[in-house]
Amino acid sequence: MLERRRNPPTLGGGGCQEYHCGKYNISADEVAYGDAENLSDEQKDTIDHVLKYYGDKNLQWLSDLTHLEEPWRKGRQGLASNERGNNVIEHSDMFEYYSSLRQEGDSSES
């Protein structure tokens, strides 16, 4: 689960919070507790697409980008730019938004 906050979205709830709470930057060593063999081929493909597009971007670029995207803007509605919020970014909102981006990207590659 992601929480909509003023600066950048943070992982909240579940196991991720205990490992990454309050961190702006994490290293690969800090997420070594997962096992890629537990992922489906579709999940691996999604991760590969994300890393291909976002992997070379710096932290500030990624943070700035989140502020432009619909799931973020939806969660910030009614909040001042300097006001902290803790609304949850719904998985369905992220799925709808990012699925549409992938479809647009796939059609342009044809």
Image (tube, helix red, strand yellow):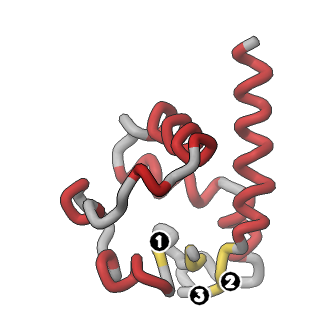
Which numbered disc, 2 or 1, marks the residue that appears first in the sequence? 1
Q: Name, please, the residue furthest toward the left.
A: 29
Q: Residue 38, relative to residue 3: is it above or below?
A: above
Which numbered disc, 3 or 2, marks the residue that appears first in the sequence? 2
At numbered mark 3, what does the secondary structure look like: helix, strand or loop? loop
Residue 69 x, y percent position in the rendering: 67, 55
Question: Disc 1 versus disc 3: distance between alpha carbons?
Answer: 11 Å
Which numbered mark, 1 or 3, is in the foreground of this view? 3
Type of residue at label 1?
Answer: Asn
Residue 14 x, y percent position in the rendering: 48, 84
Q: Residue 60, relative to residue 34: is it above or below?
A: above
Within 10 Å of the Cα at label 2, are there few (<14), some (14-19), or many (20+) other Cα atoms? few
Residue 105 x, y percent position in the rendering: 71, 28
Residue 101 x, y percent position in the rendering: 73, 40
Residue identified by numbered label 2: 79
At numbered mark 1, what does the secondary structure look like: helix, strand or loop? loop
Relative placement, left or right, of 24 versus 105 is: left
Residue identified by numbered label 1: 7
Q: Residue 80, relative to residue 101: is it above or below?
A: below
Within 10 Å of the Cα at label 3, are there few (<14), some (14-19), or many (20+) other Cα atoms? some
Which numbered disc, 1 or 3, marks the residue that appears first in the sequence? 1
Residue nearest the viewer, comparing 39 with 66? 39
Relative placement, left or right, of 85 versus 18 is: right
Q: Residue at x 68, y 83 (%)?
A: 79
Residue nearest the viewer, comparing 47 with 79? 47
Residue nearest the viewer, comparing 15 with 75? 15
Type of residue at label 2?
Answer: Leu
Residue identified by numbered label 3: 86
Q: Residue 99, relative to residue 110: is it above or below?
A: below
